[in-house]
Amino acid sequence: MKLNYNTHIKLMLLALIFMSLGCDEYLSELPDNRTTIDSPDKISQLITGAYSEGNYQRMAEIMSDNSDRKTALNDDNRFETDLYNWDELTDFTTDLDSPNYFWNRSYEAIAQANAALDAITELQGKFDLDAQKGEALLARAYNHFMIANFWSKPYDPNTASADLGIPYVLESEEEFIKEYKRGTLQETYDYIESDLLEGLNKVENRYDSPKFHFTKEAGAAFAARFFLYKGDWDKVIKYASDAVSNPQVQLRDMVAYRPLTYDQNSLLYASKDEESNLLMASTLSVWARRFTRTSYGLSVSKLEELFINGNPFVKPWAYAVYGTDQFFRLPKYEEYFRVTNPTANIGLPFVGVVLFDRDEVLLNRAEAYVMKEDYGSALNDLNVYLSKKTMNHDPATDVLTEIMVESQYPVVPNEYTPFYTMNAKQTSFVKFIAELRRREFVHEGLRWFDVRRFNLQVEHKITQFGAPLVLDKMDLRKVLKVPVTAINAGLEDNPR
């Protein structure tokens, strides 16, 4: 049986309970222009839509402790203010970069993945489609994983069987309104793991531009992050090692970036030519405009904390920070404005983002080594990493040791409290690695996930001298409210 591409996708995308605009009229007509999914190439084209155009970086970064109120700037944006204050975003249900937009776009991408999987099933026996199936499974798992890490609690095996998960959509939709259940977080993670492992077993490196698709290395990077969040240290090490075979040449060399111009830095950061990059995506977002001038970002104090202080060798960091106290930023984004109406100069802003790179993978492996108390292997990874991030690095004398980590990052009682126990040395190392990750991915939102999984308290300054807002370690606001459209369709909301 051949699948009608336009009809099938249109029905599925609109059948999701999370989409709300113009549905009745849109479903009442069938398209005249029909395309049948009857070849591997057409399935591959279908899978390109399984990568979400939603951008999570703006909301995650502003909610995290990377953001501070810039007292020298008065560019208050109410959406960003609500994010910074951890308020409900009821007035921003369709805005680009909003939680609702990311939710909708991610489930839309899941629908595309499911359509591809359906087509693969229908064409089974006619073609070898294992590679396409692997990519579609990885994309489906990744989109659910990201949704879960905003709309569910952090994974804890002691509570996951009781904590709310997210709707895990395993099949194409054939009815417009379908009642979904969230299930438990354990069920969600079990589904993700099943798709992830099957996808890894099947995916191949087969594209001319592989960094816009899940490959074996990108899938391994995803697996390393997934198992890190689950606390399965052996699997983190296994999959991280599959993604990083030679860190000396595969990491992002910020020392080499330093002489480049701002534009050269921006273009290279999310480029297919950067060896560290494993998976990139094009997102519909205004973050390339906002990250430089948002009132909530790198303040003077955050700049000092992250990019002036903290180098274990007491040398300058190699990261190039541009701008004044109003506009401190690292060059990571370039906007592509796609004109849709030349007369009115109306269009859509797209931003290329890095979803996985080898720098994160290496830090994840180092953290797993620490949890295995293999400090020698962790130090090997960290010394290679630091050589790429430190100006005037001398490998003969700039050597990280256990004593340096423990003395520079002493244990603070009740600061880092994940679901697993850590001794004093592990805590110092994990804190150090988390601070490296925080610095490396500033503007990119990854810090928010560490805030959640380590149960960190966050303070946000409101005025220069006033008391800060506090997000407690177990604050329920670390889990986003479910979109109203989904609640109206019967989905259970997160408590407050």
Image (cartoon, rainbow, N blue to C red):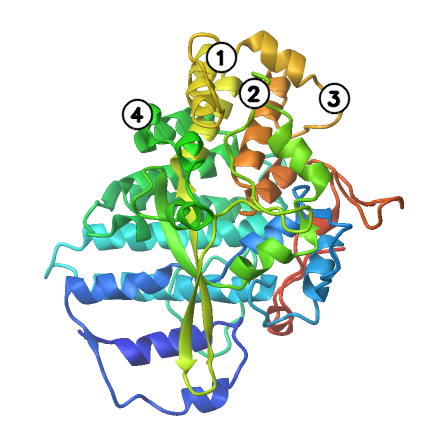
Residue 351 is tagged as none
Mark 2, Cα crowd under 10 Å, few <14 / some 14-19 / many 20+, is some
The residue beneath circle 4 is: 246
Image quadrant containing the C terminus: bottom right
Q: Who comes first in sequence, dot 4 or dot 1?
A: 4
Residue drawn at point x = 70 percent, y = 18 percent: 411
Choose top left, top right, bottom left or bottom right for residue 247: top left
Location of mark 3 (residue): 412
Disc 2 vs disc 1: Cβ atoms closer than 8 Å?
Answer: yes
Of labels 3 and 4, earlier in sequence is 4
- Crowding at label 1, few (<14), some or many (≥20) Cα neighbours within 10 Å? some
Left or right of residue 368, residue 495 in this image: right
**Residues under labels 2 and 1: Cα distance?**
10 Å
Q: Nearer the viewer, mark 2 or mark 1?
A: 2
Name which quarter of the figure residue 5 lies in: bottom left
Disc 4 element: loop
Amino acid type of disc 2? Answer: Lys
Position of the N terminus, as image quadrant, is bottom left
Q: Which mark is residue 315?
A: 2
N-term-proximal mark, 3 vs 1? 1
Give the distance between the C-alpha atoms of the residues marked 3 and 4, in whole angstroms: 35 Å
* Secondary element type, mark 3: loop
- Classed neighbour count for the residue bearing mark 3: other residues with Cα under 10 Å, few (<14), some (14–19), many (≥20): few
Is residue 174 visible in the rendered image? The answer is no
Dot 3 and dot 4 residues touching (CB under 8 Å): no
Label 3 or label 1, whichever lies nearer to me, is: 1
Whole-percent x, y for residue 25 in the image: 46, 91
